[in-house]
Amino acid sequence: MKNGNGKSRKSKDTFNFRNLSLSTARLDRDTVLPVLALLVVAFIILSSRWALQENRTGFEVHKVATRPYRAITSVGYIDQEATEKLRQKMELTRVSVMVSDVPDEQHIQEYIRKLSESDFGDLPLQDDLKELLFSLEEPQRAVIARACSDIAEQLVALDIHELPDKDQVTDAIWEQLESRALSRADKNLAFQILDALLTPPEVLDQDLTEHLQAKVLTDVSPVQRYLDPGDLIIAEGEIITPAIGEILKDQGYPQRKYPFHQLFLLIVGIAFWVSWFRIKIKQENYNLAGRNPWIYIVTLQSGGWLLLFISHMMRAEGSGLLVLAGWCYLTMSRPVAFQVIIAASLLGAFLVAGFSPGLVLVIGFMGFFAAMSGYLFFKHVTSRTNLWKELFLLGIYLSLTAIIVRWSIGIYFSWDSLLRYGVASFIWSLFAILSLPLLENMFDVLSPLRLMDLSHPSQQLLKKLQIEAPGTYHHSLMVGTLAEAAANRIGLDANLVKAGAYYHDIGKLKRPHYYVENQMGGDNVHNRITPSLSALSIIAHVREGIELAREYKLPQRIIDFIAEHHGKTCLSYFYRKARNLGEKVPRDQFCYPGPKPKTKETALLMIVDSVEAAVRADIDNITSIQDIEKAIEGVIETKIAEGQMEKVDFTLKELSEMKEVLLSTLQSMYHTRRVQKISPLNGNNTNEEAKQ
């Protein structure tokens, strides 16, 4: 089946499917490769940490402690060993339950009746006592029985069965016997009878005894121990019990075995972060830095982890984040820098501190502080000395953050920790400055220091431009001043815009006399050549500028200003001139190849460059501030109408602020509120030629 153009729909669908497959494959590659790279780095650091620390000084349960271990944070735990010893001690304690069946008043009355009848056979007496009674003569036995019966009645009258103390019952029986006319032997025998009937002996209750022993063991409270930071958990040479091993793990002390579970969680965390960050970049349209942005991000992440590992070995946990914050905020946009620092600090904390919640919390808080405050510290960098001061100050703040977090969660630290953090801040701040040029050259990223170096008049290309094309050099300085002021007003990178403005016309070094600003009132070469050749030579300055920039190894971001500062603008003057001369040439031949500005910085330069040229070209007709304002508005409206700004998203507020800054700056350049008439640069050139 064919469409209206006679082309096969199947062929078109196949083409779209192929493009979709290629896009998906590239997306998968751009996601998988950073994940694999970060995993390799994480594996190397984790294995190095294990080889240098855990494998050498890590603990093993049921093994001898090779070093003393002290508490890092406050901890409370149950001492299982002491609890077990206490239970064993309680098991050795003999607990017996003795019981006696105290008779009530009804039983006592029955005993009295049987005593009065001298019937000892049914009384609850011991067998040897019964034998002794039955061995007596009947009269003697009867006397003893009557005495016991009488005494028992009297004691019942005194409520003797309710007396709680056995000694009181015994005393009461003897008091009654003392008044009886009985022999000492009969009194002793009568006492034994009454004592057996009124206070029966205690006997062991086996069931109650066993129940009480079990209850005593179950009621043994566990022995609770408390350790403050710095307290000794186990001394060197002692056996590490399972209970002590759990405490050491909770405190974050490493075990000797390889941390495979930690590696698995790192795989999950890295894969999640890379996938999420790619989605975030697409949604927010972040501008990534460098020639290969993802390689640069992976390098920063890996470098941050390595710095955290070195800081951990120096016992100044988290101090290496100072370097990472400097790298990110000096070479990347603020949103991207924030995301990279947060991810690097959280994953890095888990990588170097493992399952130690205290140290992970310390490094995590330091990373959050570095990500939040880095933009403020590195917002106005004017020199390397100024940068070092800002880095060192950020290091001090990070150190204080670490100390405060340690103190708040009860992590042990000594006063020499302050010294270690101070030394680490000094070292890392120097390292950040020394390593920055290496990153700039390797990944083609721009820091404020590099931009200031590029903008210095002593730069080789700028000196060449100043000597060989002074008019273009002066024009570039004017554009740089205007662009820098506008960039500051609308929140763009002013250093980048100024550097881009200084180099945007370096292509004019190839044929400087072809441009009106360099003719200095002399002969205009365009009067002797065809309009097509004039347009070709003028348009070529973009391509030639790119070639020259690459020859001098300028950063790609600066090259973008050269390539995009004209967008796809057409040289209308030369096109109309060619048509008037009868040349049949396409309009595209008189247009710059582009591309159109892709960033706000290059779009701003396009506007400022055209405004400066328009004001300079029409200087004969500009006599007031209103004329300048009209020229500015005309340029902006033309660029928008031609579609030159379709790839950037300037707001109306930003355009309005841009107009205000350009107006006030141009007014100050001409030194008066009412712009006076100024002689043109070249009387032989038309205003239209100057604009080109």
Image (tube, rainbow, N blue to C red):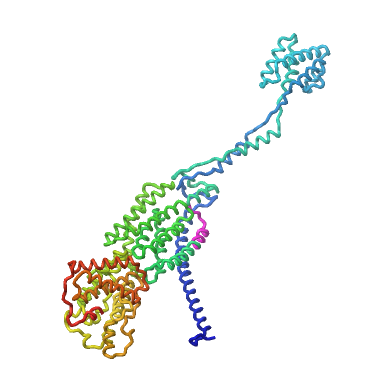
| Front one among 328 and 315 | 328
Q: Is residue 86 left or right of residue 633?
A: right
**Residue segment shown in magenta:** 253-267
Vertical order, 230 against 110 (above or below):
below
Quadrant in which the C terminus appears: bottom left
Give the quadrant of residue 178. top right
Give the quadrant of residue 562. bottom left
Is residue 254 inside the magenta stretch? yes
For image coordinates 78% across by 20% down, the residue present is 129
Q: Is residue 267 left or right of residue 372?
A: right
Residue furthest to the right in view is 138
Is residue 233 inside the magenta stretch? no
Vertical order, 229 against 654 (above or below):
above
Quadrant in which the N terminus appears: bottom right
| Front one among 429 and 25 | 25
Indicate the position of residue 286 as horizontal and vertical percent values: 40, 67
For image coordinates 26% across by 76% down, the residue present is 505
For image coordinates 72% across by 24% down, the residue present is 102
Q: In this rendering, does residue 615 appear at all?
A: yes
